[in-house]
């Protein structure tokens, strides 16, 4: 299977294919990443940040989503913040991590101008290489089988039961239907993307969604989302 090396952005979220993801980028290392992407194919990987670290930085979990930058602008024209719009493409699996050129400094402060200056000094001393994590990855085939209407309705019913349990004192069924409409989750032609979005609506944390992203078939996807909805 063909592999490639891409920049990787560990975040406290899970991005699914074909979902939009706006980001405000303020860390110097990820500003470098965005600038490099804009000079190339505009692609980078989004992964849930794991518990491990690499050179002191939070390391990504092993399965993520390739993301394409669709727009980029300098917020405030001071170079401290970049606002980017991105959209998820295909899923990938990390085969090997390429560490950044520098260890995370103990006094790292990416939010201030002084912090940016300090980072620039340390980056220059480290040789001025890539300050962000990269990874050798292989693409994972998409879940492209059809989702049956009965499977979809079963998941919607499970989500409604989960929402009712969470409300504690009961919930108006009509309000749940309105919520589904608000998130464009009313359909007679369900696809895996609808299932991903319903899972995001019912998840309690990003960690709940990582197994959903890693499902390789519709049957596995439906089973994992059903288990998520049944969990308290």
Image (cartoon, rainbow, N blue to C red):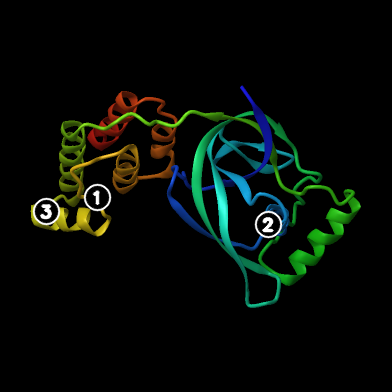
Instruction: Report the residue at 18% width, 43% height from top.
Output: 188
Q: Is residue 172 visible in the rendered structure shown here?
A: no
Image position of 143 (left or right of 202): right
Q: Earlier along the polypeptide chain: callout 3 or callout 1? A: 3
Tell me the CA gap for discs 3 and 2.
47 Å
- Estimate the x, y position of residue 52 in percent, counting from the top left: 62, 35
Mark 3 against mark 2, which lies toward the viewer?
2
Instruction: Give the residue at mark 3.
Output: 171
- Estimate the x, y position of residue 60 in percent, counting from the top left: 59, 38
Tell me the CA gap for discs 1 and 2.
33 Å
Quadrant holding the N terminus: top right
Instruction: Give the residue at mark 1.
Output: 185
In the rendered view, would you say 70 is above or below 230?
A: below
Instruction: Report the residue at 29% width, 44% height from top.
Output: 198
- Estimate the x, y position of residue 216 in percent, counting from the top left: 41, 26
For the residue pair 96 and 2, the one nearer the viewer reads as: 2
Q: Is residue 46 visible in the rendered structure shown here?
A: yes
Q: Quadrant of residue 209?
A: top left
Question: How would you rate the neighbour count of disc 1 (Cα within 10 Å): few for under 14, some for 14-19, many for 20 or more?
Answer: some
Tell me the CA gap for discs 3 and 1.
19 Å
Q: Quadrant of residue 202?
A: top left
Q: Quadrant of residue 84?
A: bottom right
- Estimate the x, y position of residue 9 in percent, counting from the top left: 61, 47
Instruction: Give the residue at mark 2.
Output: 38
């Amino acid at each position: 299977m063909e592999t490639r090396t891409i920049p990787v952005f560990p975040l406290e979220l899970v991005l699914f294919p074909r979902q939009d993801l706006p980001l405000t980028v303020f860390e110097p290392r990820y500003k470098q990443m965005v600038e490099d992407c804009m000079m190339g194919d505009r692609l980078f990987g989004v992964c849930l940040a794991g518990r491990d670290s690499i050179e002191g930085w939070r390391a990504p979990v092993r399965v993520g989503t390739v993301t394409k930058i669709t727009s980029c602008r300098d917020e405030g024209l001071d170079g401290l913040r970049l606002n980017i719009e991105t959209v998820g493409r295909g899923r990938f699996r990390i085969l090997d991590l390429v560490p950044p050129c520098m260890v995370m400094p103990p006094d790292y402060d990416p939010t201030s101008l002084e912090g940016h200056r300090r980072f620039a000094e340390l980056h220059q001393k480290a040789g001025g290489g890539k300050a962000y994590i990269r990874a050798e990855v292989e693409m994972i085939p998409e879940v492209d089988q059809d989702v049956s209407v009965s499977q979809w309705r079963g998941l919607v019913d499970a989500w409604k039961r989960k929402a009712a349990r969470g409300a504690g004192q009961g919930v108006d069924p009509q309000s749940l239907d309105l919520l589904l409409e608000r998130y464009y989750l009313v359909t007679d032609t369900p696809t895996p993307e609808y299932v991903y979005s319903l899972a995001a609506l019912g998840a309690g944390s990003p960690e709940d969604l990582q197994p959903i992203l890693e499902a390789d078939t519709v049957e596995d996807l439906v089973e994992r989302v059903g288990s998520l909805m049944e969990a308290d």
